[in-house]
Image (cartoon, grey):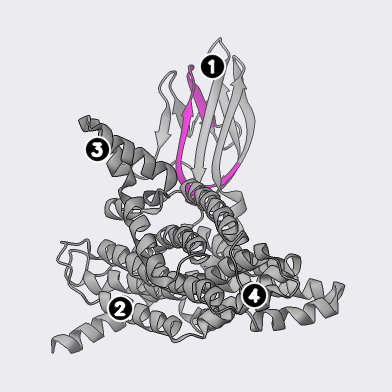
Amino acid sequence: MTLSLSVVLLAANLSVWLGPVWLFSAGISLGVGILLVLWGILWLVSRPAARAIPQIIQEGPLVPISYAVLVLVGFTILASGTMSVTNVVDSLNRLPAVGQTQLEVEIPAQVEDLEIPIEFRADEIHRYSFSSDQDLRISVQTGKAYSAPLIFVEGDEPYMWTPASKIARQFDGTVDTLYITNESDAATLLTIDVLTDVEMPEVHQIPIVAASVVGLYVIYLLLYALLPGLSAIAIATAKEAMAQPLFLIALLIGGFALLCFVYVPYNTFGEDVKVLRNTGFETIMALAIMFALWTASTSIADEIEGRTAITLLSKPISRRQFVLGKFLGIIWPVLVLFVLLGLVLMVAVSFKVVYDARETANPNPDWQLCYDEMMRVVPGLVLAFLETVVLASISVAISTRLPFIPNLIICGSIYVLGHLGTRIVQSSAVQLEFVGFIGRLVALVLPVLDHFNIQAAVAGGVDVPAAYLGWALAYCILYCTVAMLLALILFEDRDLA
């Protein structure tokens, strides 16, 4: 009886937790549409190049991602009849017109109905404020500012409205002009601050998702076109790694574990979704790191020990291209793992909100809550991927000299010390000079992996800002560059014969 009731409740909330998935899929569909437009333009410019692109993608490591993208595009089309597509389209069209508007206007003394052009919709207002050191009367109709002001601003007392205010919003419809009356004998500076947003703020993520899809394929094709030798090694390495049983095992174990985590009772008094996100990050990253270490050893160390690398280097391929191509060939399958398992985690988190709602004070959550929780997965996946890339770059450098087991031990030690480095430095406050020296040495030489740790943000329910992701990406690129330089130095004088 309990099981049948649960099935009925979850079926009733199907649109609640699938709505966010559809909105995310709409962003992917938009990205696919942009790619098709770009491909059509290329067809008009160079048909041979346009014909080659599908074959390049079909023979590369992005095939699983392409299949997942096509599935989500199909889901977007099939589920459009149950979603408010009109509201989504209207909100997308309004995105360029909303945001924060700040104006500072000099209001002369003894002026009536001074026109100030400003455009916004009343139903899109999130807050607004007017401030001046003189009394002002504000209206949206000429001739009304003095006799029937919409807003009366007292000098040195800002007039502010928010949805939580007890006063009325005052504005209605579309506003394109404000009329200001200043009765005082002194000119004053009027500061206007209006914050507006679209009816469905969740559509802000659609262009970002679309840009991510376009960027992924464009970067892949640019690398193929600009660095053909390096890309050939990378694609061959990636395809060989993805053809191994370990890749499929990692996908199956990861997907099964993420789905099972939904039904695990964490007993956290309403924080189960946060625990699911954090557990999902750790699961995906652990599988990806293990796969990256194994691939680095089999594609570099084993080829060197088996004397197959010398055959490859006998062709017009330099040692630099060999190392960098192997590194890029490891990153592509790792990216595929993160994308596919990340999609499963996002769906699981959205479903978890509805699944746990039966036992909370909010048995009927809205789809916006599911969407917010689902989109908080993305920054964590990005940071976990960057951490995996850093460890993969170290593993590549080690693989030029050592086999899998020492590589695993060293990278495991670096992983532990990389997360403990900042804590060791902080512990130097107890006046232990040796501890402080070790902490500074670890922080200087080894990567500070705590930069990619999102557990605190997950626990606090805080969104990770885009600026932080940018700095984390810069740190990842910097450390990977150092690791690749070390790999080139170690491999340069390695005897392959």
The first of marks 2 and 3 along the sequence is 2
The first of marks 4 and 3 along the sequence is 4
The first of marks 4 and 1 along the sequence is 1
Circle nearer the viewer, 2 or 1 = 2
Circle nearer the viewer, 4 or 1 = 4
Circle nearer the viewer, 3 or 1 = 3
- The residues tagged by marks 3 and 1 sit, at their Cα atoms, a distance apart of 64 Å
Q: What residue did someone put label 3 on?
A: 427
Q: What residue did someone put label 4 on?
A: 310
Along the viewing direction, whichever of 203 and 414 lies nearer the viewer:
414
Question: Label 2 sits on what residue type?
Answer: Ala
- The residues tagged by marks 4 and 1 sit, at their Cα atoms, a distance apart of 88 Å
Circle nearer the viewer, 2 or 3 = 3
Q: Magenta part mainly helix, strand or loop?
A: strand
Q: Is residue 209 above or below residue 445?
A: below
- The residues tagged by marks 2 and 1 sit, at their Cα atoms, a distance apart of 70 Å
Secondary structure at numbered mark 1: loop
Question: Label 1 sits on what residue type?
Answer: Glu
Q: What residue did someone put label 2 on?
A: 257
Q: Is residue 384 above or below residue 36?
A: above
Secondary structure at numbered mark 3: helix
**Label drawn at residue 183:** 1
Q: Is residue 246 above or below residue 423?
A: below
- The residues tagged by marks 4 and 2 sit, at their Cα atoms, a distance apart of 41 Å
Question: Label 3 sits on what residue type?
Answer: Ser
Residue 166 visible in this rendered orientation of the protein:
no
Counting from the top left corner in percent of width and height, residue 103 is at 58, 31
* Magenta segment: 119-138
Secondary structure at numbered mark 2: helix
